[in-house]
Amino acid sequence: MAFTISTFGGRSVVRADGELDVSTAPALRQTITTALDEGDGKVVIDLTAVTFMDSTTLGVLIGAHNRVREIGGALGLVCSDERVRRVFSITGLDKVFTLHDTVPDAVTALT
């Protein structure tokens, strides 16, 4: 599992690569926190390279969602894999998060 922070269109982009589970959730949480602290409160989380995601990860994403709402920011999720999208659908979180197919789509939605 690897996490990186980059920028695209003036927005911070957190990219996760690999499996997201209970053992990697703390690192994801810290990476998102760093991106929020260093940016303007508008962050894209790129999940296109994620091959597995568990409920702990959903908790991290909900926490990030709540934090950006508190600070007046915004959160965009990029997820093109149907297996990962299904996790959002099954849990009803597709009603909370807007899932984008690409980073440019998510960045555009945050502006």
Image: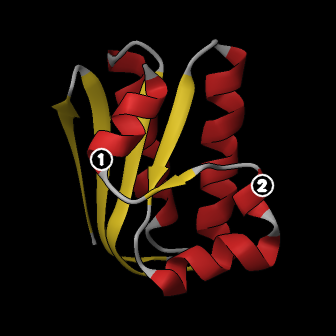
Q: Please indicate, yes or no, whether residue 34 appears anywhere in the rendered image.
A: no
Disc 1 secondary structure class: helix
Q: Is residue 103 above or below residue 78?
A: above
The Cα atoms of the two marked residues, 1 and 2, are separated by 20 Å
> Considering only order in the chain, which callout, 2 or 1, is on the residue closer to the N terminus?
2
Q: Which mark is residue 95?
A: 2
Residue drawn at the location 71% of the way across and 61% of the way down: 94
| Residue 33 position within the rendered picture, expressed as x and y whole percent measured from the top left | 46, 33
Look at 30% across and 47% down and name the residue there. 103
Q: Which residue is mark 1?
A: 103
Q: Is residue 27 above or below residue 10?
A: below
Residue 99 horizontal/vertical position (percent):
54, 56
The answer to whether marks 1 and 2 mark residues whose Cβ atoms lie closer than 8 Å is no
Residue type indicated by callout 1: Val
Of 39 and 105, nearer the camera is 105
Taking the spot 65% from the left edge, 63% from the top edge, the residue there is 58
Give the quarter of the figure containing the N terminus.
Answer: bottom left
Judge whether 90 appears above or below 101 on screen: below
- x and y, in percent, of residue 92 in the image: 81, 66
Residue nearest the observer in this picture, 72 or 21? 72
Residue 81 picture location, percent across and down: 42, 79
Q: Label 2 sits on what residue type?
A: Lys
Residue in the picture at 32% in, 54% down: 102
Q: Is residue 51 visible?
A: yes
Name the side, left or right, on which 11 lies relative to 97.
Answer: left
Question: Relative to 41, is 1 on the left or the right?
Answer: left
